[in-house]
């Protein structure tokens, strides 16, 4: 039995007329009658009672008709879901992100993607850059938001850029200034994170300090940016953080622009080989949003 046999049978059962059913199916009436006869022979019971003027379902035919409709509805649903999945409109994505990315580009991209593709389930996992690289290689995440650089063999694309600023305790002598000179912090204890977790960002911060004439004194290490800011609030030291960390408001901390020209730090998207349609849709959403933000930034710069 093939699906077409069920479609033929359902058409005749709904029309109760072989001629009308054949017209609906765009086939000739004699072949349709033969197909129904072959189906009855295969099933071992009669589906229709036929006279010269009428066609009616047998009791067994009625039951088979009702169940056949359910089968075809399920088949149609399977086809629809398959098409949606192939277009990236359905499925699941597991997304990793560094904690600092939750204060800049990640919320906007997630919101835009969910608006465009509400049927795709998103599972979010906060983890360090190195953890994401490892999980991506193992196939445990589909996409990641990390701090560059990215090792060879992994697809990546920059989606956000920003400068560095200073995070100071609210009681710090420079807390009331509009901005600070980095070299004036040379004797301060610094809150840093281990270089092994995000070497790109760590190196940019240390290099920035060295260009100002000193190497930062590490008073404490912390894995997450939020923890670093919290330790600053506890007056354990000062920190150099990405500008978007200003969105993380913590009592006892003030954020200050740095007079020296800051290096640019980035957020990159990473994804594996042979991306699924859902991954490709996500990448396109991120690119579109990044392009819009760049255009707005350029217009703002021109107006200034």
Image (cartoon, rainbow, N blue to C red):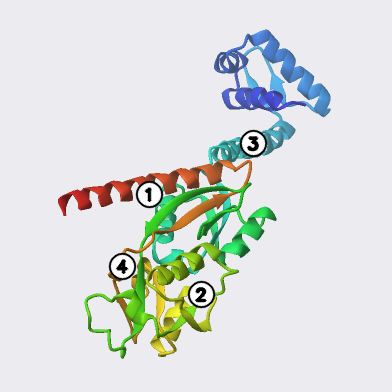
Q: CA distance from mark 2 to mark 4?
A: 25 Å
* Alpha carbons under labels 3 and 2: distance apart: 48 Å
Q: Secondary structure at mark 4?
A: loop
**Residue beneath the point at 69% across and 18% down:** 50
Foreground mark, 3 or 4, reads 4
Q: Position of residue 161 (x, y in %)?
A: 39, 56
Camera-side residue: 20 or 231? 231
Quadrant (top left, top right, bottom left, bottom right) of the N terminus: top right
Q: Residues within 10 Å of mark 4 (few under 14, many from 20)?
A: some
Q: Residues within 10 Å of mark 3 (few under 14, many from 20)?
A: few
Pointer 2 residue: 224
Which element type, helix, strand or loop, lies under badge 1? helix
Quarter residue 123 falls in: bottom right
Numbered disc total: 4
Which mark is first along the chain, 4 or 3? 3
Mark 3 / mark 2, whichever is N-terminal? 3
Residue that mark 4 sits on:
260
Residue 131 position in % (x across, y down): 62, 64
Dot placed on the residue nearer the N-terminal end, 1 or 4 = 4
Q: Are marks 3 and 4 in contact (CB under 8 Å)?
A: no
- Residue 290: image tag: 1
Label 3 vs label 4: CA separation? Answer: 65 Å
Between label 3 and label 1, give the one nearer the viewer.
Answer: 1
The residue carrying pointer 2 sits among few (fewer than 14), some (14 to 19) or many (20 or more) residues within 10 Å by Cα, namely some
Q: Nearer the viewer, mark 2 or mark 4?
A: 4
Does 45 appear above or below 194?
above
Distance between the alpha carbons at the discs numbered 1 and 4: 27 Å
């Amino acid at each position: 039995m093939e699906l077409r046999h069920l479609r033929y049978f359902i058409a005749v059962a709904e029309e109760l007329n072989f001629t009308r059913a054949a017209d609906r199916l765009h086939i000739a009436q004699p072949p349709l009658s033969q197909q129904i006869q072959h189906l009855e022979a295969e099933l071992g019971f009669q589906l229709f009672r036929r006279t010269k003027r009428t066609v009616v379902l047998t009791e067994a035919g009625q039951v088979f008709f009702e169940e056949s409709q359910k089968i075809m509805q399920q088949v149609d649903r399977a086809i629809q879901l398959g098409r949606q999945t192939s277009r990236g409109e359905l499925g699941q994505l597991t997304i990793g992100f560094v904690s600092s990315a939750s204060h800049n580009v990640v919320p906007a991209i997630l919101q835009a993607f969910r608006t465009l593709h509400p049927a795709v389930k998103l599972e979010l996992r906060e983890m360090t850059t190195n953890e994401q690289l490892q999980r991506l290689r193992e196939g445990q995440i589909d996409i990641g938001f990390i701090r560059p650089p990215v090792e060879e063999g992994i697809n990546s694309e920059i989606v956000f850029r920003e400068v560095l600023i200073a995070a100071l305790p609210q009681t710090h002598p420079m807390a009331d200034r509009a901005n600070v000179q980095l070299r004036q912090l040379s004797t301060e204890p610094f809150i840093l994170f281990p270089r092994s977790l995000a070497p790109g960002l760590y190196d940019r911060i240390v290099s920035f300090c060295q260009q100002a004439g000193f190497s930062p004194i590490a008073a404490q290490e912390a894995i997450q940016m939020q923890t670093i800011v919290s330790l600053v609030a506890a007056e354990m030291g000062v920190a150099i953080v990405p500008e978007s960390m200003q969105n993380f408001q913590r009592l006892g901390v003030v954020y200050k622009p740095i007079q020296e020209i800051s290096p640019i730090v980035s957020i990159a998207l990473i994804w594996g080989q042979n991306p699924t349609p859902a991954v490709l849709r996500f990448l396109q959403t991120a690119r579109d949003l990044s392009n819009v933000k760049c255009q707005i930034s350029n217009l703002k710069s021109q107006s200034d």
